[in-house]
Image: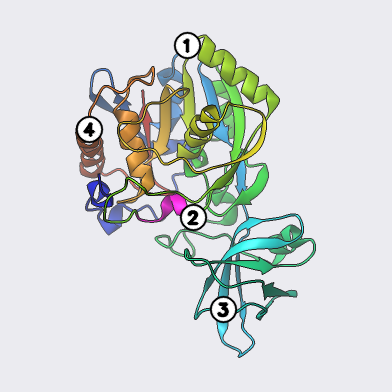
Amino acid sequence: MTGETFRFLLPEEQVAQSAAEPRDHARLLVVDRATRTLRDCHVYDLPKLLPLHTHIVVNDSRVRQARLHGTRPNGSPCELLVLSLQADGTADCLLRGRRYTAGEVLTFPGRQAVVRGAGAEDGTYLVSLGENAEAWLEQAGSLPLPPYLRADAAPPERYQTVYAATTGSAAAPTTGLHFTPDLIAKLREHHTWSTVTLHVGTGTFKPLPAGDLSHHELHHEETYLSPDVVAKVRATQQAKGPLLAVGTTSLRTLEARWNTGLQPGWEAVELFLTPGARFNLATMLLTNFHMPQTSLCALVAAFLGCTAAGEVVLSPAEAVAFWRETYQHALGAGYRFASLGDAMLIL
């Protein structure tokens, strides 16, 4: 299987440049894996689409004001994107421009930052941002919208979920953008609601290499599970109850942490799921329509190839064909793709 496997033609006009209003009025393609049928609905239909007593798991990560514009010592402009931030102000960053050198001092609004070493192969640098860096980023930084979105595509509050709580993502967990307080209240009348944390990096959204994916790895991302969530997820799994992962980030958090023992606390994950993989916890997935040739397309194809119980029933080729079938329906029916677009519910 190669990165080209997940390439498809996406018309520019179907990459959403504005979000549905209200949030839950986005369109929803419902995919029934057991019958191979597709239904056109809306996100606000979720309460009547889910089995009773579904355990709904969402990612509460909040997008950091991670993009900064400044100058280099020679006066040329620079752009910095914070990927992860330590308590001492040391950050893994992407830096645009000609290669940076250790000790180089970058000037941004309100303070200076120091490059601490040569860049890694993936283009990231270790940069010292100084004390109280998180608070400074909130004042001086801007939201790192994906490159396919116009700068004015979404106001800052629209690129955060209504339940965002823990700052740390370099991109939004976009499926959660569809939820409103009213929709959440309706869902919680008959379902269990849990939050996990996965701080979204940029590696998930980068195009897959064109060649063989056998040894491809994702950038690691930090996740957190509370003791309460671990207990609820274990209980759901033992009872063989329905569990809806809201977004690929929630699903990867659950599946990766299951593989390492499902213990509470913080842990870095880098799970790359492709057709042929089985799923241990999530019986349903709510997700957006993703950009071509990304790991997210591979994950969706893998999920389509399994039963609700997580057992693999389609060969990798058959799973990819099912994924293409659903995406071709979405394209033909005018669904909007990417971060601010429509959604798909896989039952």
- Where, by quadrant of the figure, is residue 236 drawn? top right
Question: Do the residues bearing badges 1 and 4 touch, measured as CB atoms within 8 Å?
Answer: no
User: Residue 113 in the image: x percent, y percent?
Assistant: 70, 73
Sequence order check, earlier mark of 1 and 3: 3
- Per the picture, the main secondary structure of the magenta-coloured stretch is helix
Tag 2: amino acid: Thr
Q: Would you place residue 320 above or below residue 63 in this image?
A: above
Estimate the spatial distance between the alpha carbons at disc 4 and disc 3, rounded to whole Å.
45 Å
The residue depicted at 45 percent of the width and 23 percent of the height is: 280
Q: Mark on residue 240? A: 1
Tag 4: amino acid: Phe
Q: Is residue 43 left or right of residue 256?
A: left
Q: Nearer the viewer, mark 3 or mark 2?
A: 3
Residue that sits furthest to the bottom in the current view: 74
Q: Is mark 1 on a helix, strand or loop?
A: loop
Q: Would you place residue 101 above or below residue 139 in this image?
A: below
Crowd class of label 2 (few under 14; some 14 to 19; many from 20; radius 10 Å): some
Question: Do the residues bearing badges 2 and 1 touch, measured as CB atoms within 8 Å?
Answer: no
Q: Mark on residue 199? A: none
Quadrant of the image containing the C terminus: top left
Q: In this view, does 28 lie to the left or right of 268?
A: left
Q: Is mark 3 on a helix, strand or loop?
A: loop
**Residue 18 visible:** no
Sequence order check, earlier mark of 4 and 2: 2
The residue depicted at 30 percent of the width and 29 percent of the height is: 304
- Where, by quadrant of the figure, is residue 38 drawn? top left
Sequence order check, earlier mark of 4 and 3: 3
Q: Mark on residue 322? A: 4
Range of magenta residues: 203-207
Q: Nearer the viewer, mark 1 or mark 3?
A: 3
User: Residue 283 in the image: x percent, y percent?
Assistant: 42, 21
Assess whether residue 206 is covered by the magenta stretch: yes
